[in-house]
Amino acid sequence: MNIVVGVTGGIAAYKAVNVIRGLVLAGHDVHVIPTDAALRFVGRPTFEAISRNPVHSDLYEGVAEVRHVAIGQAADLIVIAPATANTLAKLAHGIADDLLTNSVLASTAPVVVAPAMHTEMWQNPATVANVALLRERGITVVGPAVGQLTGKDSGPGRMSEPDEIVAAALAAVGPRDLAGRRILISAGGTREALDPVRFIGNRSSGKQGVALAVAAAARGAEVALIAANLEVDAPQHVSVTHVSSTLELEAAVSAAAADADVVIMAAAVADYRPESVADTKIKKETQGDTLQLTLVKNPDILRGLTERRTPGQVVIGFAAETEQDRTALIALGVAKAARKGVDYLVVNMVGWTEGFATESNAIIVLSGTGDIVSEASGSKAAVADSVLDLLV
Ligand code: CTP
């Protein structure tokens, strides 16, 4: 999608950088229009580097290409973050005195605004009336959140978190084809404690599972995320349960599974855990040159889910494999899909530099009977959408 991000002059402009980044990582072509005031908070090179596009802000530049109309006409979506009280007032009254407000007037695309201002300004009757007018016209207003403001004050007026703005923005244009569906997603990697300070774990960051949760929520699903040691922020607009070990993950997933129409096990689960956990830190002096650990097998959560599947419930597993040869990789997937009894198995190749903790992914999706039903590669957001397309 061609997305215009307007940045107006508030201190929250620095957080707009993460909104831009989120939209770029989700695979969109982002064009930033800062106001002159915004450029006093964040420099043009930052917006250009993060958006990967040239940044224009002047109404009287590029006049020959009728830029003040062309940018708005080409946009599929306009996001304004932060939106100051002044900009909200201008939008409400159709004032177009800079490139951003001209672009909004010249566009028929959905508009999403994320207001940021001090509480008194947000609660001023003028702002209240302007925001009501904008909502009436179908403009999506995200936030503001209640919290610490720029000075010593706190209250309503703080700009919503970037991932919430990204999700709301994509939801404003995206299909609502999962509306009413309840989707349970596990993400991250489980950790098995050895003692109070150490664990056995894996390198899953949780990015793919979180991308699935964000995409499913944007498409209207009611998402429950069971998060195991995420290295990324958990999305704010879905219900999140934090767990650490495989047994904790099993308990949380089992409790939520009966109510779910779809279960997606994206978490990387530790297959074994230490037979006993030391109460105090394991010391070198008492261990000598080698340390023997006895590990016991963890339950297979996915297998348990498919055995207790409710009628009509769809269960999707993930398989992270290091096999490099495509035919052999698919053969491993076919066997795993059958062993686990899943409806779909999302197979991806992982290695020292691939799959885990990266921004992109490549997947082959197998049906329960081992047929290749879809393949996708690109950002984790794009991969998430392709899995959800299949589900739909
Ligand atoms: N899984 C699970 N419980 C486990 C191990 C894995 O629920 N104890 C789930 C994962 O969440 C994933 C799928 O099973 O959706 C496949 O995980 P993977 O680690 O690839 O498979 P394993 O069964 O552990 O087989 P192996 O590690 O031997 O390849």
Image (cartoon, grey):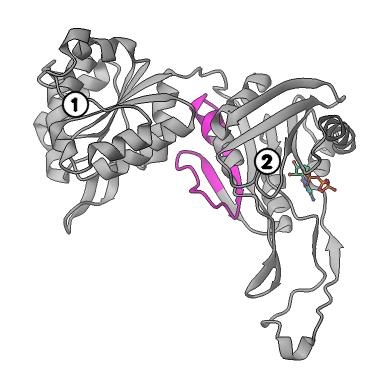
Q: What residue would you read off at disc 1?
A: 57
Residue 223 is a magenta residue: yes
- Can residue 107 be seen by looking at this rendering? no
Q: What residue would you read off at disc 2?
A: 266
**Closer to us: 125 or 389:** 389
Label whose residue precedes the other's in the sequence (1 or 2):
1
Residue 1 is a magenta residue: no
**Identity of the residue drawn at 50% across and 17% down:** 175
**Few, some or many residues within 10 Å of mark 2 (<14, 14–19, 20+):** many
Most extreme residue toward the bottom, as rendered? Answer: 285
Q: Residue 334's quadrant in the figure?
A: top right
- Which segment is the magenta one? 214-240
Q: Amino acid at mark 2?
A: Ala
The quadrant of the rendering that contains the C terminus is top right
**Identity of the residue drawn at 26% across and 21% down:** 135
CA separation in Å, label 1 and label 2: 42 Å
Q: Residue 245's quadrant in the figure?
A: bottom right
**Identity of the residue drawn at 54% across and 22% down:** 179
Q: Position of residue 256 (x, y in %)?
A: 66, 42
**Few, some or many residues within 10 Å of mark 1 (<14, 14–19, 20+):** some
Q: Position of residue 15 (x, y in %)?
A: 31, 43
**Identity of the residue drawn at 33% across and 11% down:** 74
Q: How many marks?
A: 2
Q: Amino acid at mark 1?
A: Ser
Tag nearer the camera, 1 or 2: 1
- Can residue 78 be seen by looking at this rendering? yes
Find numbered disc 2 in the image and state the secondary structure of the residue it sits on.
Answer: loop
- Drawn side of residue 118 relative to residue 238, left or right: left
**Closer to us: 118 or 231:** 231
